[in-house]
Amino acid sequence: MVQKMFKKTIACAMFLCGFAPITAFATMAYTPSRPCGCVCGDVSCCTQNDYSGNSQPYNFQRVQKSQPNEVGDWYVAANFMMNLWSWENDYRSDYTGADLLFSKDTYSFESVTGFSFAFGKKFESGLRGDIEFGMSSTFTDADDVAQFSMNIMHLTANIYHDFESGIYLGAGIGVAKPTVKIEGLLFGGNSGENSAISPKVGAALGYAKQVADNTFIDVRYRLSVMKGVDLSQPFMWDQYTGEYEQHILQIEAGLILENSVSVGLRYSF
C-alpha cells in the first residue's frame, strides 16, 4: 500500500513539473508586450513574442474618443439688424417770420431695419476681430409742407472676447455715413440732400451657438453713437407783397444714439 502511495506521489510531481512550463510558454505566446507609450492600433509599436523570442506585429483595435471638428481661424458673417435711433434736429432760417415754436424735432427710438457683413479672424485666448460693413433702411418723417428722411452706412473695426459659455463682449470704432434729405411743398418740389463722414464707436454683448460644422447662430446687442449730418436747403417765400424771396432752412443734427439688435450666421474656415 505504501508502494502505491509512493507511485501516485511520483506521478503527481511529474505532472506538475511538466504542466508548469507548458502553461508558462502558453502565457508568453499569447500575452503581447507593449513598449512604454505604445498606442494600440500601431502595428509598428504593439508586438507579440513567439516561442523563438522574436517580436511579431500584433494588431490591437484602436479605441479613440471622438473629437469635435476643429473650427477655422478665419470667418465671415452676415446679420439682419433692427436699429432704434434717437437724436434731435435743430432748425434755423434767415426768414424773420419763421415760427420759433417749431425750431426743433426730437426723435426717440425710431425703428429702421438693416443688414451687415463682416470678415474676421480668431486669435488666442478667446479673442477675435473683424471688419464690418452695414447699411440701414430709410427713416422718414413727413408733414404737410416737408418730408425729412435719413439712412446710415457704416464701416467699423471690432474686437470681441468669446467665453466658453458662448457669450461674448465686444467694442468697435470706425466711421458712419449718414445721408439726409428734405423735400416738399415748402421747397417748390425741389429736394435737398447731404451726406457726411462721422466717427462711430460702440460696445456689444452677444451670444453665439454652434449649430453645424463651423457654423454659428449669432445674436448681438450693440449700443453705438455717431454724429448726425447738417443740411441747408433754399426755399421761396411770399412776403405778402406778391413777390417771392429766397431764404435758407438749415437743419443741424445732433448725436445719434443707436440701439441695435441683430441676428445672423457666422461661418469659420
Image (spheres, rainbow, N blue to C red):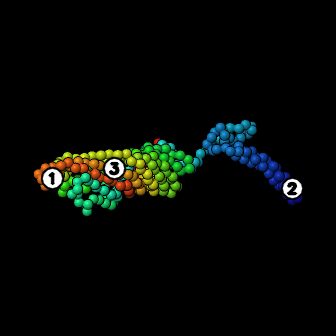
Q: Residue at x 40, y 54 (%)?
A: 225
Image location of residue 110, percent across then percent down = 31, 58
Q: Label 2, on which residue?
A: 6
Residue drawn at (39%, 52%) of the image: 226
Front position among marks 1 and 2? 1
Residue 217 x, y percent position in the rendering? 42, 52
Q: Mark 1 or mark 2, which has the lower sequence index? A: 2
Looking at the image, residue 66 sits to the left or right of residue 253; the answer is: right
Secondary structure of the residue carrying tag 1 is strand
Residue 131 in sight: yes
- The quadrant in which the N terminus is found is bottom right
Q: Is mark 3 in CB contact (under 8 Å) with mark 1? A: no
Q: Is residue 241 left or right of residue 79?
A: left
- Give the foreground label among 3 and 1: 1
Amino acid bearing label 2: Phe
User: Residue 127 placed where, x, y %?
Assistant: 52, 49
Q: Circle 3 sits in a helix, a strand or a loop, which is it?
A: loop
Q: Please, which residue is most extreme toward the bottom here?
A: 101
Q: Which mark is residue 229?
A: 3
Decide: is 120 above or below 83: above
Q: Which marked residue is nearer to the observer: mark 2 or mark 3?
A: 3
Q: Amino acid at mark 3?
A: Val
Q: Which residue is mark 1?
A: 238
Q: Residue, x 35% and y 51% (percent of image)?
A: 228
Looking at the picture, how far across and down is residue 106, in whole percent? 31, 60
What's the residue type where badge 1 is placed? Asp
Return the residue nearer the eye: 186 or 26.
186
